[in-house]
Image (spheres, helix red, strand yellow):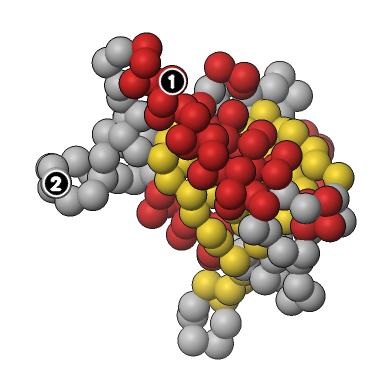
Amino acid sequence: MRTLWVEGSPKQHDSLSSALAEEFLAAAPAAAVGEVERFSVWGEEVLRFGRDAAIAKFAPLLGERRSPEQKQIWTAVLGEIDRVRGFDRLVVSSPMWNWHVPHALKAWIDVIVQPMASFTLNERGEHVGTLGEGRPAQLILTRSSAYDGTHPELQDFQRPYLEYVFSLLGYRVETLVVEPTTRWTPEERARLREDALATARGAGAALEPVRPA
């Protein structure tokens, strides 16, 4: 049993979304998460999907040959997809940045979302995920404002995007949202943090072992 924690915030221990994920995983039964690998999308070693990768992606569809550099980067892309495929559970923690996800998290998602490698199309032209294969993905999200309809002008591109993309990849997605996180006094911020951490612990403790897909 192996769990991949994808950490979307660069603030690490100073991030509420990261602290929530830590509490969630610490409270979870060992049988439900097993060995946990913490993966920051901000690391220097994280694969970047740049020009050569973009050209390599479409070369076969256009009848073009890949250069040696393009073959090398595409092998690395497929390797990252296979690495993620090797985990039984995903936990993705992320703050909201400018109504969306941090750019480093989006950049990593751009690596692992690849036609024929992590999803395909069925005979009706519908997207079918081949990466998740029915395994669970837990989203742990924080946002400074409340997206409860009180202010309809606020646009939420964080939760819908992450739920859509990991569902498309074939995962069973569950979402824990803490909002609004803006508090104006230290006492209010401390109370929010403690309440949110307790919620994360409760969600983690309720995890069940991964069922076969």
Label 1 residue SS = helix
- Is 7 above or below relative to 140? above
The image shows a total of numbered marks equal to: 2
Q: Quadrant of the N terminus?
A: bottom right
Label 2 residue SS = loop
Q: Give the residue at the far bottom of this rendering.
A: 123
Q: Is residue 101 visible?
A: no
Q: Amino acid at mark 1?
A: Ala
Instruction: Please name whichever residue, 28 or 85, is drawn nearer the observer in this view of the structure.
Output: 28
- Marks 2 and 1 close (CB-CB < 8 Å): no
Residue, disc 2: 150
Return the mark for residue 95: none
Indicate the position of residue 184 as horizontal and vertical percent values.
27, 15
Left or right? Give the position of 129 relative to 78.
left
Q: Residue at x 54, y 49 (%)?
A: 139
- Is 101 above or below relative to 44? below
Q: Residue at x 54, y 35 (%)?
A: 197
Q: Give the residue at the far top of this rendering.
A: 186
Residue, disc 1: 190
